[in-house]
Image: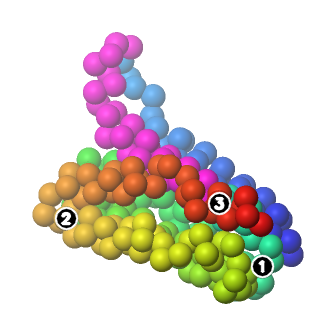
Amino acid sequence: MKPERLEAFSDGVFAVALTVLVLEIKIPAGIDWSALQDIWPTFFSYVLSFVYIGIYWNNHHHLFAATHRIDAGVMWSNLHLLFWITLFPFGTGWMDGSHFAAKPTAAYGAILLMAAIAYSILQHNILRLEGPESALRREIGTDLKGKLSPFLYLIGSGLAFVEPWMGCALYVAVAAMWIVPDRRIERALRRS
């Protein structure tokens, strides 16, 4: 299978996850601005998950643009990542529906943690195939953000049991760290 086919399949899964996510937003009952006050948790959790799915889609696209070949390990690790991405709407809905109670907020962080681990596994499998001298491996280097993110999600999940807003604040901080596309992969694309 060519990397482009796997990327196209993945794009479809990302699109479905975004669609399911938006279907969770209920239309406010009232017609004035105060009606929106009742749905702020829904809107906040929607925006956060939309941003996260967008970050994963963007970085996934860049990673596969620099990928020349794939094997069964890459295919399965990609599917593993997509599994966790498709759980974002579930985590979002549970967190929102509970008005950010401790356990659902911690569970949301656990989903973010597992998606980060899955992305790391996918990246590792791609780098294994690309070889030690590939431009992609040189540019990714130590991948500090990629190693720091799971640790921060774990802390955020723990903080959710102390004070859920603290867990959410950490999830927002990690998203802010990743909102800019990974420039390292763009450099690798220019070099290859």
Q: Amino acid at mark 1?
A: Ile
Q: Residue furthest left?
A: 162
Magenta stretch secondary structure, dominant: helix
- Mark 3 vs mark 2: which is more N-terminal? 2
Point 20% across, 55% down: residue: 166
Q: Is residue 79 left or right of residue 146?
A: right
Q: Quadrant of the N terminus?
A: bottom right
| Closer to the camera in the image, 8 or 151 | 151
Q: Residues within 10 Å of mark 3 (few under 14, many from 20)?
A: some
Q: Earlier in the sequence, mark 1 or mark 3?
A: 1
Image coordinates of residue 190 in percent, x first then y, are 73, 58
Disc on res. 70: 1
Q: Position of residue 139 (x, y in %)?
A: 59, 70
Residue underneath mark 3: 187
Q: Percent x, y for residue 191?
A: 73, 64
Identify the image quadrant of residue 187. bottom right
Q: Secondary structure at mark 2?
A: helix
Q: Nearer the viewer, mark 2 or mark 1?
A: 1
Is-magenta flag for residue 51? yes
The local crowd at label 2, few if under 14, some if 14 to 19, many if 20 or more residues have their Cα within 10 Å, is: many
Specify start and end residues of the magenta stretch as a single range: 31-60
